[in-house]
């Protein structure tokens, strides 16, 4: 009887040792296997403020990878709305991208200008901060900021005479680069082709459109602004023996 009990205890001890060996083996194997570590990502906090340094709620904040993408309003990385305090949070950004062009806009206010490009100051920090200052839209922004809108010329008036020939009818492409480019309208030969070699740019004071760089002595033509709304633009050019008036309407 004692021999049987002793044999039973020995077998129970062997089973316990086997369990310990199995558990130890599993722990050893799991320790040897490489752990799955997710790739690090970045979080970008964009604080939108107005000219009075107040947080702007409801602003549309968009990240682009390049200035070209911003100008054409394509290939946006992500878009967020700022919260009640003016904060827009972008999470899980690519760990290999450290430079973004950041656009912030609300109605006629935006931050569009030369200071939109943001590079991470310290790539070792997983959370980055950027402040976007927006202000009321200037004339140049009205022309540029509504996203590649197309305008159609109503007529050209020279000394009271209207001309609606295809050779004198163009469309304007208002891009974010603050340049106006003439295009041949639909229904005319070569429709859609660019008709102007040089685009029109707003003057610095917003009173006119000029060919060439603003305030340059080499500007050859200047069109004064008679009327500018969200849907209509009227221009006048005073020549020696004639006055040219051009009107444009928005094409949705």
Image (cartoon, grey):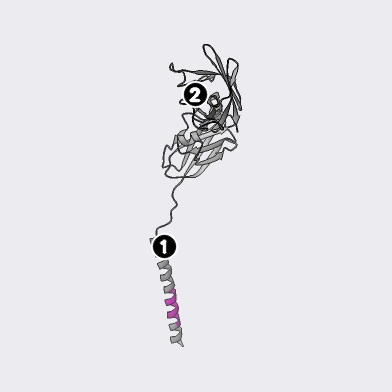
Residue depicted at x 49% and y 18%: 221
Q: Position of residue 209 (x, y in %)?
A: 52, 21
The single residue placed furthest to the top in the displayed view is 240
Q: In the displayed structure, would residue 190 be above or below residue 4?
A: above
Residue depicted at x 59% and y 17%: 161
Specify whether residue 2 is painted magenta: no
Q: Is residue 129 left or right of residue 160?
A: left
Label 1 element class: helix
Magenta stretch? 8-16
Q: Which residue is denoted by mark 2 in the rendering?
A: 201
Label 2 element class: strand
Q: Which mark is residue 30?
A: 1
Specify whether residue 10 is painted magenta: yes
Q: Position of residue 210 (x, y in %)?
A: 49, 20
Other residues around mark 2 within 10 Å, as few (<14) / some (14–19) / many (≥20): many
Would you say residue 136 is visible in this rendering?
no
108 or 217, nearer to the observer: 217
Q: Position of residue 193 (x, y in %)?
A: 49, 32
Residue depicted at x 51% and y 44%: 91
């Amino acid at each position: 009887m004692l021999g049987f009990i002793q044999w039973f205890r020995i077998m129970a001890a062997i089973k316990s040792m086997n369990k310990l060996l199995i558990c130890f083996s599993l722990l050893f194997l799991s320790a040897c296997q490489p752990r799955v570590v997710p790739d690090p990502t970045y979080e970008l906090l964009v604080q939108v403020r107005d000219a009075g340094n107040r947080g702007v709620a409801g602003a549309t904040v968009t990240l682009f990878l390049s200035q070209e993408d911003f100008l054409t309003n394509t290939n946006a990385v992500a878009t967020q709305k700022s919260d009640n305090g003016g904060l827009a949070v972008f999470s899980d950004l690519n760990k290999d991208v450290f430079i973004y062009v950041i656009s912030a806009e609300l109605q006629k206010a935006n931050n569009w200008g030369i200071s939109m490009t943001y590079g991470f100051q310290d790539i070792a920090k997983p959370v980055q901060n950027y402040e976007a200052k927006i202000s009321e839209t200037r004339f140049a922004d009205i022309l540029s900021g509504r996203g590649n809108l197309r305008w159609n010329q109503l007529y050209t008036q020279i000394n009271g005479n209207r001309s609606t020939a295809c050779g004198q009818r163009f469309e304007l492409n208002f891009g974010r680069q603050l340049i106006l480019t003439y295009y041949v309208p639909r229904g005319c030969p070569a429709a859609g082709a660019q008709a102007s070699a040089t685009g029109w740019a707003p003057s610095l004071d917003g009173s006119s459109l000029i060919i060439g760089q603003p305030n340059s002595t080499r500007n050859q033509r200047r069109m004064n602004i008679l009327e500018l709304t969200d849907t209509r633009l009227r221009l006048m050019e005073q020549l020696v023996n004639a006055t040219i008036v051009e009107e444009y309407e928005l094409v949705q």
